[in-house]
Image (tube, grey):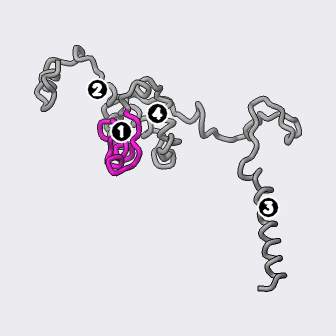
Amino acid sequence: MSARGRLMGVAVALLLCGCERGMHDMYAPSAYRSGSDAARFDDHVATRRPPQGSVPTSGAASMPAAAAITPAVLERGRDRYTVYCAPCHGTGGDGDGMVVRRGFPAPPSYHEPRLRSADDRHLYDVIAHGWGVMYPYGDRVAPADRQAIVAYIRALQFSRHAPVDRLEPSDLARLRDLPGSGGAR
């Protein structure tokens, strides 16, 4: 290759490097805080109104009103939980699912105090939008099924922390007879 060809190659490489720097704004756009001054808009206000007729996809409007928790809702929640959640979270909600046993990072247990005290909205949103390494399932799990899964998670949590004195005597006897229960009291 001639000296002129090498010089041309270097010039093109430098030009492309400059383009990358100039494109930086496209990759990392500046963000405005609500209510701050925004020079790029004619009214200089950063807070924008949503377009007429738009439908919110997050925030308070994205979680439908809670349905009654019935045995059918819990059964649907268990079914959807088994399909979408148990591979990572485990059947009991301990974060020890089959995927975790094969090396994937363990999710938190639903039985830890932070998640026991989290509101239903948080669990619903995590199902829809993901969290950390958890994939978002909003496009796979319908809103009613998300609610059913949240109800089932609450049942799992309650099952570990239910006051024994609230159990029927027949249920308490069955619990004491379970292998490994150590005679639950």
Which one is in front in this view, the residue at disc 4 or the one at disc 2?
Answer: 2
Q: Position of residue 104 (x, y in %)?
A: 39, 48
Tell which of 69 and 60 is nearer to you: 60
Which residue is rendered at x = 58% and y = 30% of the image? 60
What is the x, y in percent for residue 6? 79, 79
**Residue tagged by mark 3?**
19
Earlier along the polypeptide chain: callout 1 or callout 2?
Answer: 1
Q: Are marks 1 and 3 in contact (CB under 8 Å)?
A: no
Spatial CA distance of label 2 from label 3 is 58 Å
Residue 24 falls left or right of residue 181? right
Q: Which amino acid does label 4 sit on?
A: Leu
* In front: label 1 or label 4: 1
Q: Is mark 4 on a helix, strand or loop?
A: helix
Asked if disc 3 and disc 4 are in contact, CB closer than 8 Å, the reply is: no
The stretch drawn in magenta includes residue 86: yes
Q: Quadrant of residue 61?
A: top right
Residue under pointer 1: 95
Tell me which corner region of the image, top left, top right, bottom left or bottom right, holds residue 16: bottom right
Magenta residues, as a range?
A: 81-109
